[in-house]
């Protein structure tokens, strides 16, 4: 959509009024082979936002073939500097059009518009980071001990066609997290967005074309996980799958990848411990621990949902977190005063409210929230208020299972050793938090917690240069950082005998 100087609201409206959204395959916007579409809804009011093409196996085959042709054809002739320049152009376009991208994301998945707009810096920074890395990847020379005059060195080559399957809770961030390193390293991509939130990815596809990404380098196939997603995971001509989502789906992707032993990067779920000691700066910790869960209506994989609080301050601290939650404004996602928007879908609403009932049945006490909001306009949307459960025991389901909603399970502990053992007593290992003024205690907990990211006196801070990923059932591989790009390349060792 070549309207770079139009007001973003006008661009967004034009995008939504352009008929059913199509698939991007081989540089062309095309209908699904089946001709089917699906409806995407506004979670704030249940109204239709758009019709979107429902891609399936045939469309995945077409997209993978286009990606393979581009990988072996024109894209293979792009030098690192060419890929860097393209990523910088894309970064400029994303920054220029970000208000419209944020509006689409908010309309479709319900993140408060202020939150969506605040992701501008993160998205632009990631693209700039990958642009820098495009010219920084290199192999090494190796002093070997082989007989004769053998010279050894390594080169790093793009892994090939990448299948990227992303969730609905931050679609544009996730798309950039997958596409950025692929473009930097010279791979090609077939992106499968979530059927709950595809619009910002499709608009991003238009910006990819405007930036000059050659046809077939990035393909976007919308549709269901069972249809398009499963076909992509099992496709024999896909070299790598990068996936963000639940560990249940991650397990199925591992099984589907066995046919050709695809490379895998899996960023899965979490039930992260957030540990607050009595010596912490409580004025700083209260809002941070609250928003570690309530941000994005709790729909964040690394949310600090198990709030461990030292017994001496437990009651006071947990009540302060609950009071903070009560003070947050729950409302329509497009309202700039809204701090907590709706859950993404009716299915997610049912899941979260079922856990609210489970928590009460298990004996936990809600200090705030605990029930779906139904009065007035709330009934039209998927609204659950910030909820804090006290009296939670480690064996309760609300303390063990990922809820993916604005629900905190507060748990008392007595000492650092106990907090460490209980914090690690989970199948997950994505994130963790530690709040203390004691540097020794901070180091002990940070090193002892089995999680891919540990935040000390902060929570959910992300930077493109810092790797992010999980231990245990939270997956493997990393997003961001040097390791991220290494997941998109193969290392080839070359040895040349230069003499007798």
Image (cartoon, helix red, strand yellow):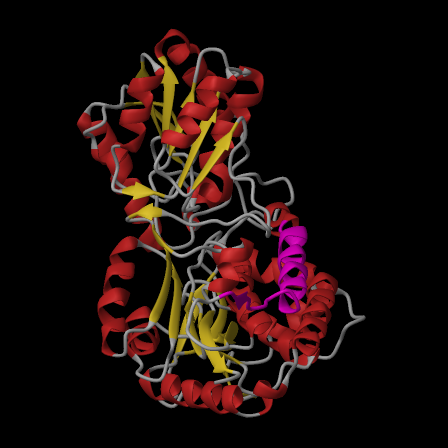
Q: Is residue 127 magenta?
A: yes
Q: Is residue 463 magenta?
A: no
Give the image quarter of residue 146. Answer: bottom left
Give the image quarter of residue 58. Answer: bottom left
Q: Residue at x 53, y 16 (%)?
A: 437
Q: Position of residue 488 (x, y in %)?
A: 47, 69
| Magenta stretch secondary structure, dominant | helix
Q: Position of residue 329 (x, y in %)?
A: 55, 34
Q: Which residues are magenta?
A: 119-143
Give the image quarter of residue 131. Answer: bottom right
Q: Can residue 335 be seen here?
A: yes
Q: Residue at x 32, y 69 (%)?
A: 225
Could you say which is closer to the camera, residue 190 or residue 33?
190
Q: Residue furthest top?
A: 312
Query: In the picture provided, is 370 more to the left or to the right than 154?
Result: left
Q: Residue at x 54, y 47 (%)?
A: 332
Labels in figure, total? 0
Query: In the picture provided, is 85 more to the left or to the right than 426?
Result: right
Q: Residue furthest right?
A: 5
Q: Can residue 190 be seen here?
A: no
The N terminus, quarter of image: bottom right
Up/down of 399 relative to 309, above or below: below
Q: Position of residue 149 (x, y in %)?
A: 50, 77
Could you say which is closer to the camera, residue 246 or residue 330?
246
Q: Position of residue 373 (x, y in %)?
A: 40, 38
Up/down of 10 relative to 59, above or below: above
């Amino acid at each position: 959509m070549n309207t770079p100087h139009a007001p973003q609201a006008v661009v967004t409206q034009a995008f939504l009024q352009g008929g059913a959204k199509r698939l991007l395959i081989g540089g062309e916007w095309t209908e699904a082979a089946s001709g089917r579409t699906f409806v995407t809804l506004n979670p704030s009011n249940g109204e239709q936002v758009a019709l979107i093409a429902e891609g399936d196996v045939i469309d995945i085959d077409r997209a993978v073939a286009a990606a393979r042709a581009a990988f072996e054809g024109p894209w293979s002739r792009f030098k690192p500097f060419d890929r860097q320049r393209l990523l910088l152009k894309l970064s400029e376009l994303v920054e220029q059009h970000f208000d419209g991208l944020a509006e689409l994301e908010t309309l479709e998945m319900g993140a408060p518009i202020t939150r969506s707009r605040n992701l501008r810096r993160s998205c632009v920074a990631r693209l700039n980071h990958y642009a820098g890395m495009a010219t920084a990847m290199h192999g090494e020379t190796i002093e070997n001990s082989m007989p004769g005059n053998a010279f050894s060195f390594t080169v790093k080559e793009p892994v090939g066609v990448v299948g990227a399957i992303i969730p609905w809770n931050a679609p544009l961030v996730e798309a950039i997290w997958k596409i950025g390193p692929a473009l930097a390293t010279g791979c090609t991509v077939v992106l499968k967005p979530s059927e709950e939130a595809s619009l910002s990815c499709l608009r991003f596809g238009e910006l990819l074309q405007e930036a000059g990404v050659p046809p077939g380098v990035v393909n976007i196939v919308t549709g269901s996980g069972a249809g398009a997603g499963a076909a992509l995971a099992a496709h024999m001509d896909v070299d790598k799958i990068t996936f963000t989502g639940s560990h249940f789906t991650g397990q199925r992707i591992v099984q589907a990848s066995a046919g050709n032993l695809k490379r895998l990067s899996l960023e899965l779920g979490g039930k992260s411990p957030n540990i607050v000691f009595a010596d912490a700066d409580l004025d700083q910790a209260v809002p941070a621990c609250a928003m570690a869960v309530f941000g994005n209506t709790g729909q964040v994989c690394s949310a600090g949902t198990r709030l461990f609080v030292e017994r001496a301050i437990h009651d006071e601290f947990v009540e302060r977190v609950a009071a903070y939650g009560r003070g947050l404004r729950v409302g329509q996602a497009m309202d700039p005063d809204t701090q907590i928007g709706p859950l993404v879908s009716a299915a997610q609403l049912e899941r979260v409210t079922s856990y609210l009932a489970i928590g009460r049945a298990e004996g936990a006490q809600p200090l705030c929230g605990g029930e779906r909001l139904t009065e007035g306009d709330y009934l039209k949307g998927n609204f659950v208020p910030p909820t804090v459960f006290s009296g939670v025991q480690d064996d309760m389901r609300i303390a063990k299972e990922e809820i993916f909603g604005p629900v905190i399970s507060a748990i008392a502990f007595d000492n650092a050793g106990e907090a460490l053992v209980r914090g690690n007593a989970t199948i997950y290992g994505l994130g963790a938090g530690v709040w203390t003024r004691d540097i020794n205690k901070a180091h002990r907990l940070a090193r002892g917690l089995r999680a891919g990211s540990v935040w000390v006196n902060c929570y959910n801070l992300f930077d493109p240069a810092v790797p992010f990923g999980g231990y245990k059932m939270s997956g493997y591989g990393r997003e961001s950082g040097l390791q991220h790009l290494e997941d998109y390349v193969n290392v080839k060792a070359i040895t040349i005998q230069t003499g007798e």
